[in-house]
Amino acid sequence: MINLKARETKTLVAVHGWAGAMLGLLLYAVIVTGTAAVFSNEIKLWSGGLLGMNDPLNQPLGAVLARLEAETPEEFRGDLGLRATPAGRVHAFFHTDETVNGVRRERGILYVIGPNGSVISRQEGLGNELAANDPHTALGRFYVDLHVRLHVPNPWGLILTGILGLAMLVAAVSGILMHRHLFRDIFVMRGRARLVGLRDLHSVAGTWTLPHAFVLAFTGAYLSFAIAVALPMLAKIAFKGDVREMVTTLNGLNVVDARRAAIADIDRILSDARQRAGAPLMSAGWENRGRADSRITVFPLPRSGDLTAMRLIYNGSTGELIRERPIVGLKPSWGASLLGLIGPVHFGNFAGWWSRAVWFALGAASAYVAWSGLNLWVRRRSDQPGWRGLGRASAWVGGGLPFAMTAAAAAYFTSLPSLETAFWTPAAFLIAALLALVPTIVMRSVERVPPLLFGATGILMMVIPFLRAAAGGPNWTAALAAGQSAIPVMDGLVALGGLVSVVSAGLALRRREQTTFSAGAIMQSAE
């Protein structure tokens, strides 16, 4: 039991309410998109329409890379990035650094390597633009970008989501402090009246999800501000804006030696890294190829049972291991371990499917808390035109955001055969958002809008597995034979989610009609 004076409780109620009212819709959007982003890797694999290797970097690459290097202009041969994709391919990016509009970026040639060393495609351009144009990962990438920065240009999108994380912390802490009977309110539903029941359900869901909300808010704010503010500030102050020099220094490898030297055997290095890590490899970065100060940094996945993984740094000339290092510092420490936990804890990928499922459920509950809290705040002020407008906006975002996200997925699969997914995925999201705005404006009873939009979302979700199959995606037998269980699992989860959405929407509309009928009967009796 938390005992506060009436004045303190009133202040906390105001802080809690205004924090949600001012940023509630954006906070709801971040939570909903984050709930989908929990399965971002599975979504990329499920939606890619391809069956590749489970560990793409576990194949002979030396001869293929040597052949590709000979075909690459000399200006791009100095650095090489290797990355395993969710579709089971390898992206090999030969590149060099250049400054564009005062911003240092990587320009080069991206080769997509399939199984058995086959070269599937070749593209030239800036690294971030080439990654953004990958048609087979557009859906998962769209969801992640929507969550991380709401598709607002950098660095403002990250700063905005960082502020939303702080607002979520304020709402969570103030919400728990103003409960006079915390543990009793976890289980008690005090009334059957619609408004009282909504308030109780908001309180119960908010109390149960408090630890999860607090962790998400803290880790999300940290990640946003660290990427958008802290690291660029460190690079600008200590390294005059040279990010590459900053990374080299933090790795403890700031010795410059431009003498020509041999090129190490990349296959032997990747094999050694895989054995040391005891896990598949995600990526590798090779700097200053053909020089005495050449370095190869390998990034493995965490070993089974571990939450974080070490980075392995090799001499790019001799192939010898220089050191293993954590995410921060040159040797393991408590600080590095805690920092390494932030990403896995925020995205819920620390225990496979089980942790993702729990994070998904808690994320959905947190989204309900943010949305229902905003509705409660608006209803108390429904006699004021401005607040009624916010109520309609809440109905639009609350039901329209899931609908638009599902429409983006449907458009992705529809456009996948033409490889135009990078355009149609965001375009369909915007079109669906505008369509969802129509009933919000036209319908007299705004409370009917979210159930209708949730019902439409459910119907789309149940259709999506068929759209995936029609787009040429692998069937369940082929997916299971290739060890890609995420494909049938995601099909089942999407269809089940659609069914739940349709049933829930139908029940909500039925309750609304019964409430309206009862109110009309009471008025007629009174007359």
Image (cartoon, grey):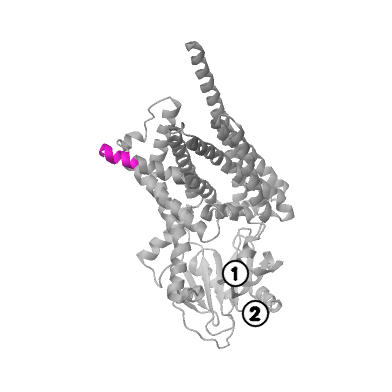
Q: Picture quarter containing residue 317?
A: bottom right
Residue for point 49% across, 15% down: 522
For residue 82, the mark is 1
Asked whether residue 91 appears in the rendered view, the answer is yes
Counting from the top left corner in percent of width and height, residue 483 is at 61, 54
Asked whether residue 57 appears in the rendered view, the answer is no
Give the crowd class for mark 1: few <14, some 14-19, many >=20 residues within 10 Å: many
Q: Residue furthest bottom?
A: 259
Q: Is residue 376 above or below residue 304?
A: above
Query: SS of the residue at dot 2?
Result: helix
Question: On the picture, is 131 further left or further right than 256?
Answer: right
Q: Amino acid at mark 1?
A: Leu
Query: SS of the residue at dot 1?
Result: strand
For residue 75, the mark is 2
Closer to the camera in the image, 107 or 312: 107
- Sequence order check, earlier mark of 2 and 1: 2
Q: Amino acid at mark 2?
A: Glu
Give the crowd class for mark 2: few <14, some 14-19, many >=20 residues within 10 Å: few
Counting from the top left corner in percent of width and height, residue 345 is at 44, 54
